[in-house]
Amino acid sequence: MGGGMSTLAPPVPKTSLATPGRLRSLDLRGPAGRLEALLNQGLPDAPFAALVCHPHPLGGGTLHNKVVYHAMKALNDPAWGLGWPVLRFNFRGTGLSAGEHDGLAECEDVRTALEWLASEYRLPLVAVGFSFGAAMTVSACCASACHPQVRALALLGLPTQVEGREYHYPSLAGCTIPKLFLSGDSDGFASAAQLEAVAASAAEPKRLRLLPCADHFFSGQLEPMQSALAGWLLTALAKEQLQ
């Protein structure tokens, strides 16, 4: 399965003279109206720009979610080896974003954010989503409507079963964008067996990484999550998989 469980030594934060990008507040124009957003600006020579999507709004998910924030830091802080500009936004009906929660149409919000990033930076894009945000990232990027500049997907805590509702991802079978499935081995919304089945159904290239002793929210395991995320992206870049 594209290498299966990763055995590569993960990167660790190191002291850097570079500083993380300046924070910029902005509004995007989505299908349901205004989308509240924050941009952590990257290094001037950053080769990629990234989007990070938040978990379910009805469960309290916002762009300030701790997993979303730490994922952003792994992509944006030069100490992790990347230093990319990273956009976060609130889905429709969340925070100051207009509209109402739908549960499916949020994939259009993801596409709006990708369009803005592509227009702003004219760089290849990496799309990252956590939980509900991961599900919406799959919906937005594993279809014919995916933005052509998207080069990789990182799916954190991709859910398979939540409160009796099952999540299925048939579009993964034809999705040839490089994909990382990153979850805890004790995720209450996706058992290891269920996530292995989802990853097995996905087209190559792909990698599945289950973090030991980690739950759905990577409680106490946020730094290993960052290491796994940054490490996969650095490896993929080194192999020119994302170019």
Image: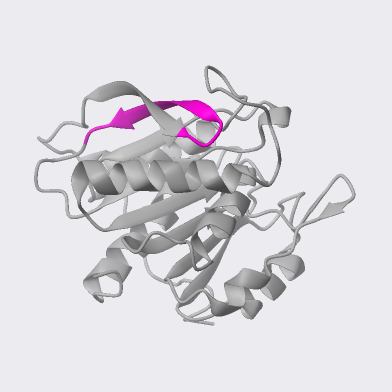
Q: Quadrant of residue 190?
A: bottom right
Res 10 visible: no
Q: Give how far across and how far down residue 207 sits, in percent.
A: 49, 72
- Tell me the quarter of the image containing the N terminus: bottom right
Q: What residue occupies the far top of the structure in this picture?
A: 96
Horizontally, is 231 left or right of 132 in the view? Answer: left
Which secondary structure type mostly characterizes the magenta part of the structure? Answer: strand
**Part of the protein shown in magenta:** 30-41
Res 18 visible: yes
Horizontally, is 154 left or right of 165 in the view? Answer: left
Foreground residue among 82 and 117 = 117
Q: Give how far across and how far down residue 220 sits, in percent.
A: 57, 38
Horizontally, is 60 left or right of 35 in the view? Answer: right
- Residue at (77, 49) in percent of width and height: 188
Foreground residue among 186 and 114 = 114
- Residue at (55, 78) in percent of width and height: 174
Q: Is residue 32 magenta?
A: yes
- Tell me the quarter of the image containing the C terminus: bottom left
- Residue at (63, 55) in percent of width and height: 158
Q: Give how far across and how far down residue 93 sits, in percent.
A: 62, 25
Q: Quadrant of residue 228?
A: bottom left
Foreground residue among 185 and 159 = 159
- Residue at (53, 66) in percent of width and height: 142
Rendered position, 112 above or below 148: above
Q: Give how far across and how far down residue 68 sits, in percent.
A: 49, 37
Rendered position, 43 above or below 169: above
